[in-house]
Image: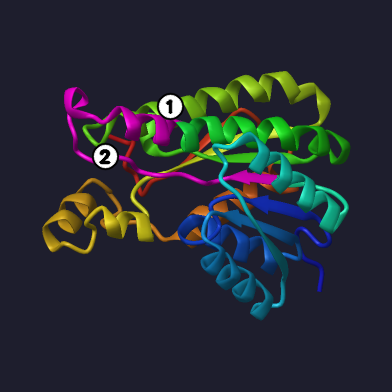
Amino acid sequence: MSKMFNGEVALITGASSGIGRAVAMAFGAEGARVAVSGRNSEELAKTVNMVSTNGGEAFAVKADVSKTADVQAMVAKTVEHFGALNFAINNAGVAGDVFVPTVNYSETTWDNVIGINLKGVFLCMKYALPHLLATKGSIVNIASTSGLVAGPIGCAYVASKHGVVGLTKAAALEYADKGVRINAVAPAVILTEMTERGGINDPAIAAMMVAKHPMGRIGRPEEVANAVLWLCSKGASFTTGHTLAVDGGWLIP
């Protein structure tokens, strides 16, 4: 049976859980060969196993995307293992201090959030692009609705995700006539380990979050993965520099 990405290669960062793991599963199910990256070797091994159990092909590359040497090695190992790179999904991210006023925000946390969420995306794009130019591939950066509107959820997170949206637009213009499409996805609240750590299992917090989504629920990682796959597909061949909200209506009001 023909699949959407038969034999092509996708590299997904932050693939040890949540959205990244769902994206890896989705690419594997569509015939792609998948490189999964993150900082937790045990969880990456679980992702590889899940992709393989579902009939896909995957291998893991441990990396911290805020470190240049790690990103260079991650991309090089992926290309060495599979022979090419068609898609780079830059998903690795951290929340930082949530609901902390700017005046009280830790400089150390600021540097960590910006380093992973924004610098990490930049580094991954920088070192993936030479290979994507060769295959006329695509990049999808995982932003957030916090990259399109602000809220009192942590200044570094909001700043980093706004930066991802701007970086996506700038790079898309640079490479639009070179055959590489660069887009972003902006999820609202998605049920992941990160949102669980943020208190989504608390009924009061969950009710508050659900109320912000006109669809009356929070999202699932698989729903974000579906958007990523579409942006990488031939169906999105005339789409670049776009940030696609997967938000249950969050941004409508």
Q: Classify mark 1: helix, strand or loop.
A: helix
Could you tell me which residue is drawn at 75 percent across and 24 percent down? 175
Identify the disc placed on residue 103: none
- Choose top left, top right, bottom left or bottom right for residue 206: bottom left
Q: Is residue 239 visible?
A: no
Crowding near the residue tagged with mark 1, few <14, some 14–19, many ≥20 C-alpha atoms within 10 Å: many
Q: Nearer the viewer, residue 10 or 184?
A: 10
- Could you tell whether 66 is left or right of 203 in the image? right
Q: Which residue is mark 2?
A: 97
Q: Which residue is mark 1?
A: 162
Q: Classify mark 2: helix, strand or loop.
A: loop
Contact (Cβ within 8 Å) of mark 1 with mark 2: no
- Choose top left, top right, bottom left or bottom right for residue 150: top left
Q: Position of residue 8 (x, y in %)?
A: 81, 56
Residue 158 belongs to magenta span: no
Q: Is residue 124 above or below residue 91?
A: above
